Amino acid sequence: MDAKQKKRYEVRANVLKALAHPSRLFMVEELSGKSRCVCELREMIGDDFSTVSKHLSVLKNAGIVQDTKQGTQVYYSLKIPCVLNFFTCAEKVLKQNLAEQKKILE
Amino acid sequence: MDAKQKKRYEVRANVLKALAHPSRLFMVEELSGKSRCVCELREMIGDDFSTVSKHLSVLKNAGIVQDTKQGTQVYYSLKIPCVLNFFTCAEKVLKQNLAEQKKILE
DNA sequence: TGACAATATGGTAAAATAGCCAAGTGAGGA
DNA sequence: TCCTCACTTGGCTATTTTACCATATTGTCA
């Protein structure tokens, strides 16, 4: 791998890294369809305001979500809907894993 | 989010986390189509043998790849091909990001 | 059997990440 | 204008991740 190729994979990995956290994954799914303000997400997740805010900025920096101010509130929405495909695939991986674990126990 | 839902997202995030590293992403793409032995992957990546081996075990533990021994070599192959979709989507995110950066510079 | 080749594993130091508290910002209402 | 609400940012510590080196392990071949 030369430097250029390496960079290519780094950049891609960063997108995945941004998604690879339970709360952020939850947010992304929650933002599919409708946009939500930080306070709504915070309530659903239950973490500190600052924690939720930082997670959102990670997603924003990765280019996955976008934000708009509406008065005193900030609304986030999903920018690239295809990230939802990750769920479908992750689900497949997990199902397969479960199936194999069952097989071992039989 | 109750404990059960939290667990659900944790498990999914773990699949993504396994993919969220440049070398591992490279391997997954490289393993699409044909299987490769550790030494081949090591040569392509250029890291230490132990490093490559550990990356592979991360992918294996996540259920993304599988391995078979052939004599003294270990061949890895992709178990769940849909992970390749990640690339397509990550690509879209990146393209969009680039397009926006260009807009800002104009 | 002994030695070597291909991997895996344990240990460890450095870097990155997560989540809390406290302090800062900015819009809207009293 | 001052206060408050909805966030964001900075600072800090605990945890996780990464990648190397050294040390097993395991199969092959002489």
Image (cartoon, coloured by chain):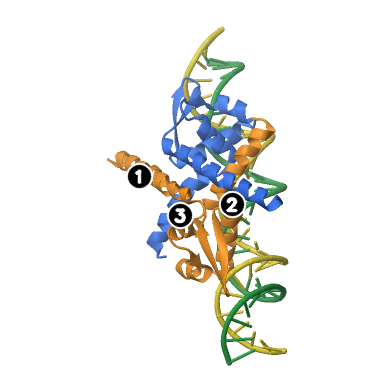
Chain colours: A orange, B blue, C green, D yellow
Q: Quadrant of the N terminus of chain A?
A: top right
Residue at 61 percent of width and 55 percent of height: A61
Q: Secondary structure at mark 3?
A: helix
A29 over A69 or under it: above or below = above
Q: Is the Cβ of the residue at disc 1 closer than 8 Å to that at disc 2?
A: no
Location of residue A20 in the rendering, given as x and y in whole percent from the top left corner = 52, 51
Residue at which label 2 appears:
A62
Residue at 48 percent of width and 49 percent of height: A83
Q: Secondary structure at mark 1?
A: helix
Q: Nearer the viewer, residue D26 or B58?
A: B58
Instruction: Name the subunit of mark 3.
Output: B
Q: Nearer the viewer, residue A18 or C17?
A: A18
Q: Quadrant of residue B53?
A: top right
- Do pointers 2 and 3 mark residues of a single chain? no
- Do pointers 3 and 1 mark residues of a single chain? no
D1 over B35 or under it: above or below = below
Q: Is the Cβ of the residue at disc 3 closer than 8 Å to that at disc 1?
A: no
* Left or right: where D14 falls relative to B60: right
Location of residue D1 in the rendering, given as x and y in whole percent from the top left corner = 72, 89
Q: Residue furthest left?
A: A106
- Mark toward the viewer: 2 or 3: 2
Label 2: few (<14), some (14–19) or many (≥20) C-alpha neighbours in 10 Å: many
The type of residue carrying mark 2 is Ala
Q: Secondary structure at mark 2?
A: loop
Alpha carbons under labels 3 and 1: distance apart: 15 Å
Please tell me the numbered disc located at residue A4.
none
Q: Earlier in the sequence, mark 1 or mark 2?
A: 2
Residue at which label 1 appears:
A95
Residue at 64 percent of width and 33 percent of height: A5
Residue at which label 3 appears:
B10
